[in-house]
Amino acid sequence: QVQLEESGPGLAKPSQTLSLICNVSGDTIGSGGYYWSWIRQHPGKGLEWLGYVSHSGRSHYNPSLRSRVVISVDTSKTQFSLKVRSVTAADTAVYFCVRGGNSFNYFGMDVWGPGTTVTVSS
Amino acid sequence: DVQMTQSPSSLSASVGDRVTFTCRASQTISTYLNWYQQKPGKAPNLLIFGASSLQSGVPSRFSGSGSGTDFTLTISSLQPEDFATYYCQQSYSPPLTFGGGTKLEIK
């Protein structure tokens, strides 16, 4: 059974880089044609897709983040990471790592980490 | 970007009721439409993928329909554990986008 879990600092200072890691257990990135995403949810708000890395290592990002986001895969293929540069208070949110499905399930996001809260504050 | 619009934003219903949620895409997305349920403090849970396919482990009282730009999620007989927020999401083209959600509350 595939499980995901986010880890990283719960607090970031304005203008710094937010870095989170998603640990993947029960699967490896690269198998099954899956896409691996990061999604965030601002307090009391809806869901925002930040980007994904594909099974082949190709990345695609949400243009709304203005190139501040990088998603990459660890060489072990059991972790993928998120970096958000130049954070502000607007980046305060719960961050989820997600297995974003494959072509067989219309890329439905079928496995989610529990989420990790990141607060941006000086 | 494909904009996703859900209606209503909130809905009150009783146990045993049949409820329907609506989601509209700003352009055609074929059947690349997924539905999620989210309870407070928890990650979303995939209910329906491909507009009408039930995710494994999801009760059969949930069903989805639609194609193109208009989609619906129906719960045939509400159970107490169904009170939550429901989101639609298009996976047709990046950036992947979600609707604003419909909060289902107990009447």
Image (tube, rainbow, N blue to C red):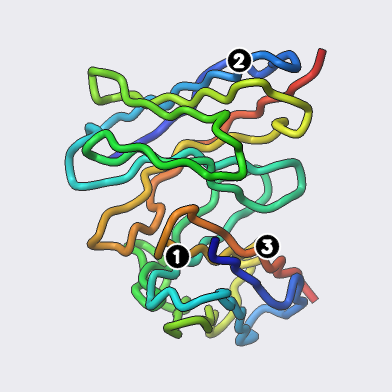
Left-right relation of A117 to A105: right
Residue to which mark 1 is pinned: B47
Residue type pointed to by label 2: Pro
Marks 1 and 3 close (CB-CB < 8 Å):
no
Q: Are marks 2 and 1 on the same chain?
A: no
Q: Which residue is mark 3?
A: B100
CA separation, marks 2 and 1? 31 Å
Q: Which mark is residue A9?
A: 2
Q: Residue at x 23, y 62 (%)?
A: A104
Q: Name the quarter where the N terminus of chain A is drawn.
A: top left
Chain containing the residue with disc 3: B
Question: Is tag 1's residue or tag 3's residue first in the polypeptide sequence?
Answer: 1
- Kindly indicate whether the residue at mark 3 contacts the one at mark 2 (C-beta within 8 angstroms): no
Residue B29: image location, x then y, percent: 43, 74
Which amino acid, by three-letter code, is at mark 1?
Leu
Alpha carbon of mark 2 to alpha carbon of mark 3: how far?
Answer: 28 Å
